[in-house]
Image: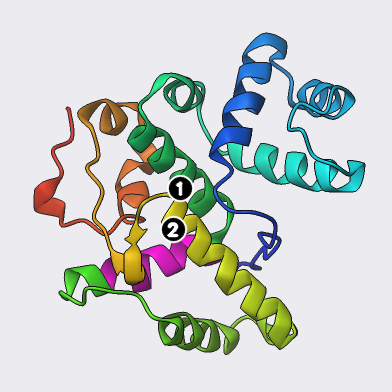
Amino acid sequence: MNHHYLMSFSTGGLFLTESIKVVECFMRLADWPRVREHVLAINLLQVRALSTGKRVVREVISRLKELSPEELTLLLHGDSQEQSAILWIAVCRHYHFIGEFACEVLRERYLSLQPDLQIDDFIAFYNRKSDWHPELERLRQSTRKKLRQVLFMMMRDAHLLVEGDRINPPLLSDRLLATLVPEKRLQDLQFFPVFETDIRIAR
């Protein structure tokens, strides 16, 4: 049976700065409901409207909850490339639609030596998935466009796309590879446009 796609990623991009602030709060409080309450109470993310704050906090926490304690620690203390990679993994774990797009479109185009990512690639993927997922068929064209824009923004934020939406293979550090949950590691690596021969996993 096909899983139901969660398509609530129309807010913001990768949220690197916001995620760091929320993780710092979580390291002190160790409880996601308390973190949410505290972040909103003091407007930690410095948003203008409470409704926007609630939406952003909900989105950030939903992604961060996909990460292990070790992955959260690396997100907090890693370099910018490690942080971006960890957040991209969190997004792909949380949103199966994005994870499958990363594996089936972004990575496959790179492996087949196609240097860039086009809007038509997203449209073709969306239409293909719609045949099996009626929740996609029900979305308005304006919503589909917004989701595409946000997804491309995330990939740029994660430095997987550069100028002209050219595909940019990341350098995945040994520390990052060793930190990933072993049971999820092989799947997580499929989210990136890299050749398997370029990855050395610490055993």
- Picture coordinates of residue 80, whole percent (x, y): 38, 33
* Colour pattern: rainbow
- Picture coordinates of residue 109, whole percent (x, y): 26, 74
Image quarter (top left, top right, bottom left or bottom right) of the C terminus: top left
Marks 1, 2: nearer the viewer: 2
- Picture coordinates of residue 187, whole percent (x, y): 35, 51
Q: Is residue 143 visible?
A: yes
Q: Which residues are magenta?
A: 97-108
Side of 192 where 99 appears, left or right:
right
Please identify the quarter of the rendering in which residue 16 is found.
top right
Q: Amino acid at mark 1?
A: Trp
Check if mark 1's residue and mark 2's residue have beta carbons within 8 Å. yes
How many neighbours does mark 2 have within 10 angstroms: few (below 14), some (14-19), or many (20 or more)? many
The tag earlier along the polypeptide, 1 or 2, is 1
Q: Is residue 98 magenta?
A: yes
Of 77 and 68, nearer the camera is: 77
Q: Amino acid at mark 2?
A: Met
Q: Which residue is mark 1?
A: 88
The numbered dot on residue 155 is: 2
- What secondary structure is found at the residue carrying circle 2? helix
How many neighbours does mark 1 have within 10 angstroms: few (below 14), some (14-19), or many (20 or more)? many
Q: Is 58 located above or below residue 111 in the figure?
A: above
Q: So how many labels did they put on this image?
A: 2
Which residue lies most toward the left here?
197
The numbered dot on residue 57 is: none
Q: Is residue 1 visible?
A: no
- What secondary structure is found at the residue carrying circle 1? helix
Side of 173 where 183 appears, left or right:
right
Q: Residue at x 51, y 60 (%)?
A: 153
